């Protein structure tokens, strides 16, 4: 009952809740709150590129920040006071790196997790190594983690696992919200898993993947253990499903093909008729 109450308060206070959160833009999630108060306006500047070499940490005062490379080596990061960002160090390795932020209190533990893809020499290890390694007491794990040519897409169903101290956490409430203003929630199953179908909440969609900048989503959950409240979130960019313009282009191509085929049939038919008429005329002259 106590846990349920905390979850309800967490969801209902989303407009004013100060949250430890990785963000590609300083005021990204603040703009979401403004949009929710003044619908249906959409702020297209909230969509951010997916490749970050530096990143903001919202409500990050007194937070411990760790950067974990694909081979699980850890580096402690410090805030760059001039830019207000965390500058991501070059590890010389490609693939996903983990950004882990934690804040500890007397009876509380808050955390935020994000993965960033870095350029470098082949790491020689699967990205699943860093994704599946335990980094936090309470953690949301994508299953599976997105790869280079497969991302979090709208209309696709994506599964996540909630675990506490490395063990699956059943019947845990998880809230998904997007920088486009969508919110949904659900409970994990007996294996700690939950699946969300990502919303089609982009206001304007253009043909071509690069023409549509990604938006952001975050997953949040809470768990109480030994009088300590654990709060965590996982966030990442998500993208417009390519089916939008592929279906349109496919339909246009089909119509074009049908039109061209019709012209060819008409051309052959007219050519045959002309040939027949000439033969008949030639036969008449010969007679």
Image (cartoon, grey):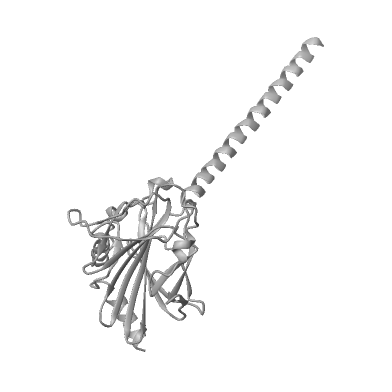
> Given the current orientation, which residue lies at the most extreme right position?
287
Q: Position of residue 131 (x, y in %)?
A: 45, 63
Residue at 69 percent of width and 21 percent of height: 274
Q: Who is closer to the viewer here, 31 or 259? A: 31
Rendered position, 281 above or below 113: above
Rendered position, 263 above or below 97: above
> Given the current orientation, which residue lies at the most extreme bottom position?
1
Residue at 35 percent of width and 69 percent of height: 233
Q: Position of residue 85 (x, y in %)?
A: 24, 57
Q: Position of residue 142 (x, y in %)?
A: 45, 65
Q: Position of residue 6 (x, y in %)?
A: 32, 82
User: Going by the image, does 230 lie left or right of 132?
Assistant: left
Residue at 42 percent of width and 63 percent of height: 199
Q: In which quadrant will I find the C terminus?
A: top right
Residue at 45 percent of width and 56 percent of height: 151
Residue 113 in which image quadrant: bottom left
Rendered position, 154 above or below 255: below
User: Going by the image, does 218 lie left or right of 78?
Assistant: right
Q: In which quadrant will I find the N terminus?
A: bottom left
Q: Who is closer to the viewer here, 253 or 117? A: 117
């Amino acid at each position: 009952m106590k846990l349920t109450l905390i979850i309800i308060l967490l969801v209902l206070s989303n407009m004013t809740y100060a949250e430890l959160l990785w963000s590609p833009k300083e005021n990204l999630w603040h703009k979401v709150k403004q949009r929710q108060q003044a619908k249906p306006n959409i702020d297209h500047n909230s969509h951010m590129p997916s490749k970050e070499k530096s990143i903001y940490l919202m409500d990050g005062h007194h937070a411990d920040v760790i950067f974990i490379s694909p081979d699980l080596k850890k580096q402690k990061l410090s805030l760059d006071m001039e830019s207000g960002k965390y500058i991501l160090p070059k590890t010389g390795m490609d693939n996903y790196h983990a950004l882990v932020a934690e804040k500890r209190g007397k009876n509380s533990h808050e955390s935020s997790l994000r993965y960033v893809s870095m350029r470098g020499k082949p790491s020689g290890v699967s990205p699943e190594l860093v994704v599946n390694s335990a980094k936090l007491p309470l953690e949301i794990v994508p299953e599976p983690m997105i790869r280079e040519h497969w991302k979090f897409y709208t209309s696709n169903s994506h599964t996540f696992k909630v675990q506490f101290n490395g063990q699956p956490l059943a019947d845990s409430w998880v809230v998904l919200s997007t920088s486009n203003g969508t919110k949904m929630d659900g409970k994990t199953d007996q294996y700690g898993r939950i699946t969300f179908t990502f919303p089609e909440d982009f206001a304007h969609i253009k043909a071509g993947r690069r023409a549509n900048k990604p938006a952001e989503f975050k997953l949040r959950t809470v768990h109480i253990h030994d009088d300590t409240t654990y709060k965590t979130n996982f966030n990442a960019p998500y993208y417009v499903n390519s089916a939008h313009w592929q279906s349109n282009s496919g339909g246009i191509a089909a119509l074009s093909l049908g039109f061209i085929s019709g012209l060819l049939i008409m051309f052959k038919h007219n050519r045959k008729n002309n040939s027949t008429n000439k033969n008949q005329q030639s036969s008449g002259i010969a007679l």
